[in-house]
Image: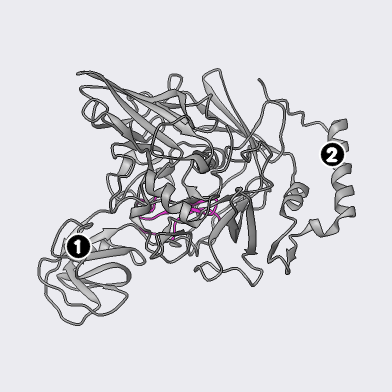
Amino acid sequence: MAVQVNKVMTFGDTVDLITKVHKASANPVAVAPHYDGTKGEYDNLGEWFSLRRDGKVYGVDIPEYTYSNDPKGIKTRDNVGLVCQPATNTTAGRDDYSKLNAFEYFTVNGTVDDSGKFHCTAMKGDGRFRADGSNGDVWVMACPGYYSITRSNGYKRLLYSDTKYEGMRPLPGQKYADGTERPLLVFSPYLAWCDSNNVPHSYSGKVHTFQFGSHDTGISYSKKKGAGYTGRTVADNFYLQLMLMIKYATQDLQSLGGCTDYANQYKVLEAETGVNRVLLPKAAADYFLVGSTLNCGPNSDRGATAGQSTFAYRTVTKIETMSDRCAVYVDGAPFTTAVDDYVSAMPWKTGTCDNLLGTDGYPIAGKPKQRQPYRIQGIEVLCGAYEPLCDVIVNQVKTSADEGHCELYKCFDSRKYSSALDANHVKLDLELPARDSKTNGQWMYNEDWQESAKCPGLLVPTGSKGTSTTGTCDAIYSNPISSPGLRELQCFGGLGNGSMYGAFCGLSSAGLGGYGWNYGGRLSGLGVTMA
């Protein structure tokens, strides 16, 4: 169905405008967020977001791979002429979206109750907000949104608005399980850190807990926090994919930034005792970045105990260059180094992008952006760790010695998630690209994507003949012939391997409980939903 958006003021528009004015005059407190000190939360955010709606429609046309393999698109409708330039800690960049209702976000503290309702307890700037966990989890809060995806004349045509028009549907996760719509959306800006009881949290300044980075632990650990929480979902993925395509008119997230090429290791050149530095080859000075995270130990396996026995997850504070070597300084207690200890780059800590001078971007200007996390809509992504979907299960099926395929199953209500393909999981209409004996167990670049009819918002990669600069610019790994069975779908990408990672990357190889040092989970507040 075509989206009906008449940009001329209609009678219905006039009625809506009059209604807004009436609501504002009848309830003037809704013009601004209102904090109820008795309840300890904001109590009018739904009405506030409703009054902020402007009805603008932002579009982008992305070419279908069979028409053009260019990952870039063309902005349409109210999106024409708008620009978003990545910011850093020292440069703001132009951002025409930051104050538009459909794109403006608010960094908040809050909780999710067992029914999936979000309770906002603080907003950045109100004096109560804290990013470090002292006032609870940190979330990015945004208005409800509506979108459509159609195809014509060789293009995928995406539209997005803060107002629902005929032919548009609510964003994934926007509906509660009973079918009513959420008054607002929330997303976790950080990978999750888990406390000693394995309860996950969204805090700044933490080393993410890689054990939370599996399908099963993303579910089980979240339930320790409450029935309304879960790990990453399709809704969380789609929001980032949509924002990427609408704001930047591209499918290539790595063209903007993201830590996908930061896996080097260097050996210690000289042993020292009681120091906060490691003496490394001079090349390490140009490679390692101040603010990033390092491990050190006698083993090159950075996830093993011996790979981090000298120090673990320390932040680089400064780097000094000498005539034939360099000294890399880290925070924390002094330590003793040994010759040939391995110093390894690790995933960045949460909150790395907290000090950007703009909405989107990466922290350090003048340094390779492929070694730094990227923030989009206030959400840090590509931090050096894969992120699993907790609402999707892959069933890898071997059909012959030379053929295999990957079925997709989706559970729509996080309170019913499990590691079994029970009646709560719906077999979807699309699958990951099929594999043969030559492509099984290989990273294969996607050509395009298709939206699932049974799971709106799930953009399933198609084709396997793309490249790092064509199509989605991202790749899928699966091995149904050599390893059939249930698998988790890991997204975005890890610390190294570079060009295959991004917004449309997928890794289907680990079992549903699989995780490693380069995995990481993320809380979701959008799991209690319906198809």
Q: Residue at x 49, y 63 (%)?
A: 354
Residue 175 image position (x, y, % from top left): 63, 39
Residue 114 image position (x, y, % from top left): 58, 51
* Quarter of the rendering occupied by the N terminus: top right
Q: Residue at x 43, y 55 (%)?
A: 191
Q: Tell me where residue 65 sits by quadrant.
A: top left
Q: Which residues are magenta?
A: 358-383
Q: Secondary structure at mark 2?
A: helix
Q: Which mark is residue 305?
A: 1
* Quarter of the rendering occupied by the C terminus: top right
Q: Secondary structure at mark 1?
A: helix
Q: Give the side of residue 247 with respect to residue 465, left or right.
A: right
Identify residue for label 2: 16
Residue 480 image position (x, y, % from top left): 27, 27
Q: Residues within 10 Å of mark 1 (few under 14, many from 20)?
A: few
Q: Give the side of residue 363 with respect to residue 48, left or right.
A: left
The correct choice, above or below, for 427 with respect to 191 in the image is above
Query: Does any portion of residue 70 appear in the rendered image?
Result: no
Residue 91 is covered by the magenta coloring:
no
The correct choice, above or below, for 30 with respect to 178 in the image is below
Q: Tell me where residue 350 sits by quadrant.
A: bottom left
Type of residue at label 1?
Thr
